Amino acid sequence: MSEEPVVYTKDLQKIFKDFWRRPRARAVDGINLELHKGEVYGLLGPNGSGKSTTIKVLLGLLHPDGGEVKVLGKPPRDVAVKRKVGYLPEESYLYPYLDAKETLRFYATLFGLEGSMREKRIDELLEMVGLSHTGRRRVGEFSKGMARRIGLAQALINDPDLVILDEPTSGLDPLGTRQVKDIVRALAEKGKTVLLSSHLLADVEDVCERITILYGGKVQASGPIRELLQVANHLQITLKDLDEAHRVRLLDTLEEQLGQRPTLEPTRKDLESFFLEVVAQARRESGEGSGTRAEGQLAGFLTASAAEENRTDIE
Amino acid sequence: MRSIFPIYKLTLRSIFRERVALSMLALLALVLLLLPAGLETDGTIQGALRMHIRYSLGFSSFLIAAMTLWVSCASIAGDLSSKRLQMLLTKSVHRAEIWWGKWLAVVTLVSGLMFVCGGVTYLRIQQMVQTAALSPEEKTELASQYITARRPVDADYIDLSEEANAMADAQIEAGAVPENFPRENLVAQMEHYLRVSHNAASAGQIIPYDFQLPNPLVLGSTFQISYEYDGASMGNSTAPGAWHIDLPGKEGVQVFETEENPYGTKVIEVTVDEALAGATALTLRFENRSEESGRVFFKTDQGVRLFFGGGSFFLNLFRALLLLCGMLGLLAAIGVSAGSVFSLPVACYVSAVVLLMQSFSGTVEEVVAGGVPAIEHEENQLSHSIKVFQYKVFQGVLVVLKPLEIESPLGRVSKGVLVSPSETFSVFFLRFAPVVLLISGVGVFLFSRREIGAAA
Ligand SMILES: Nc1ncnc2c1ncn2[C@@H]1O[C@H](COP(=O)(O)OP(=O)(O)OP(=O)(O)O)[C@@H](O)[C@H]1O
Ligand SMILES: [Mg+2]
């Protein structure tokens, strides 16, 4: 199992055709992917580059027009594969008249989950995505981000080995974005494979080990993110609390030693961490709002040890 | 098959939540309550009864059929266009489970509605019968002919094909027929002509009808002779006649004289006397006792029948409703399959065409019965090919329509005629079930090959 890639495609092709079977769009044009157990893989690309189409082929929703595709060692349309896959679509297509719990219960039942185990998972997932307090409110009334969160919860209901997230952070506030990233990292730590697509580069950069950049349905760049982002011959030194006198001395010394004078700039937080700090502060001061609240911790049943004892091998 | 139930539940729920069912229910209630008030009856309680069952309930069942089409087409097509199917199909569900879950939900809903309408109609009839001011005779007549379930026995079928063939040949030999006129059509015409003559009596003439009885007649029990006039060619408004009951070797065991308007259906009550007791076959002879020349005609199809025993009206209505539910189940299967292959408007259109075709199934049947069209004189190959193609299409349509064709259950209930349990059973399991399975098979097969998320 560890040898076999979790997702494998070779020369994958998908051409959208019109009613008369004339090719209209080459959405995927010869994509090779290989994802291994426990890794977080990013699929990047501008709008219309074929990310969602690739994902739909991996899920068996669309049929490839060429090439090979295997998910967990099997063709993706095999129902046995679907038991071990979780999917969050681009938009959450929910039944508007169900509440959050009922939504999860419905999907759980489709995986054959029942009784107290099912309810426990549902509670944990709702807790995880910060929707446990929505009660009987119907998901049709949910805000975009709330719908996204319930979408994420349903993708994890079956404790999947492979989690496919299509733009998981779209519509989420920075808090939610951070939580999703934490969840993704935690999932990978527990040995699950995560494939996520996004055009929010910062998100991908934070969580993915390897990425593929698509453009026009073709792979433009692919590899470990560290290697791809390395700027040749540039180094960075970080120091804390340096007074003016030390600064001048440091620069002088470096210039003396290296024959070039480096530039000095204060370290800046990124906007994300600044925003998160502000919200955390506000929360401490004024209590909870009516939207979402979450701890960003992985649901209990998804952690490896709990997964062992809860696993109901559904066949 | 585990996932059928959650899908079933959710589908039912969405039908209710989307208020389709509720608005339909409101419309149905309106029809059931207002239509009887709006329709004129002939003033008799029998007329009112017929109107309640045939028109009120009949119209409701038509509405329910229309609703079945809509809901069933929307069940999968709707989920597809709202993209929920994208999420559903990434779970561990087989597409067959989705198909059956949706179908069951639609069938549950429309059958429920059908039985609610049936129940309302039944209660109204009960109330009507109880409150009507009827003489004791009228009450017995009502109980023996309408609020009952009488088992019909039809006269022996007379095979006229040989005679018709001979006549056709004679016509052709005599040169009375245009050259290109298809022979089958000529034979059919001759046969029709012969059948009408077999059911017509001129002044002084007698027409016989032979009956095989399902059980020997029991002394003291009663049965009915029911005959339906199909018009008369005579001046008088009343036609004198007589019905003779003959047993093998014994003529005129009982004779009933009639003097009546030769229109509509008439019923004679017969009490089994010692002479008739134990008989397993009998012959009815109608004698036209008119002095003038002129003929009376009886309907060629089920014009003269015997009716035995009164079963439960309630159970009869129940079985008729079951049959209707079976038909709705078939319609739902067509709708769900169409909805899983086509987009919602196309699916609705396709299934509506099937439903309409069903109303014209007589025409379709005639076309198919006419045989592969022969190439006509001076007809070019293309137009002939088109005709043959049309014929093939009609033949295919008939395969789907044929099982839908049963003698109107509500029509029979309204006339107090039995819809037998064995018929209900066989129609259900030998006709509806296989066709539903076939349609579901085709639907699931096409659905499984369908891409989800591609342009429709
Ligand atoms: N159902 C469809 N029918 C026809 N063409 C389609 C269909 N879906 C996608 N395409 C085309 O395929 C190409 C890739 O689309 P895809 O949705 O995979 O892009 P994406 O990378 O997910 O974009 P985004 O970032 O906007 O989500 C686009 O050119 C799009 O127009
Ligand atoms: Mg996309």
Image (spheres, rainbow, N blue to C red):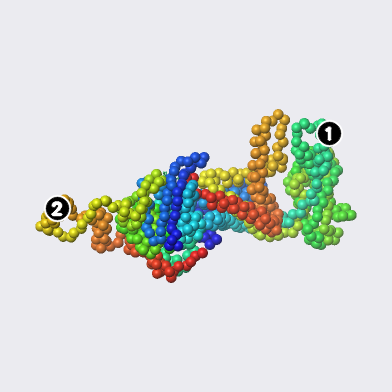
Tell me the mark number nearer the camera, choosing from 2 and 1: 2
Left or right, residue A269 beside residue A36: left
Same chain for labels 2 and 1? Say yes or no: no
Q: Residues within 10 Å of mark 2 (few under 14, many from 20)?
A: few
Q: Element under label 2?
A: helix
Instruction: Read off the chain for label 1.
Output: B
Rendered image: mark on residue B30: none
Q: Is residue B9 above or below residue B179?
A: below
Rendered image: mark on residue B173: 1
In percent of width and height, residue B95 lies at 53, 55
Amino acid type at circle 1 is Glu
Image quarter of residue B274: bottom right
In percent of width and height, residue B340 lies at 53, 50
Residue that numbered label 2 is attached to: A255
Q: Residues within 10 Å of mark 1 (few under 14, many from 20)?
A: few
In percent of width and height, residue A128 lies at 36, 63
User: Which residue: 75% across, 57% down?
Assistant: B308
User: Which residue: 25% across, 54% down?
Assistant: A271
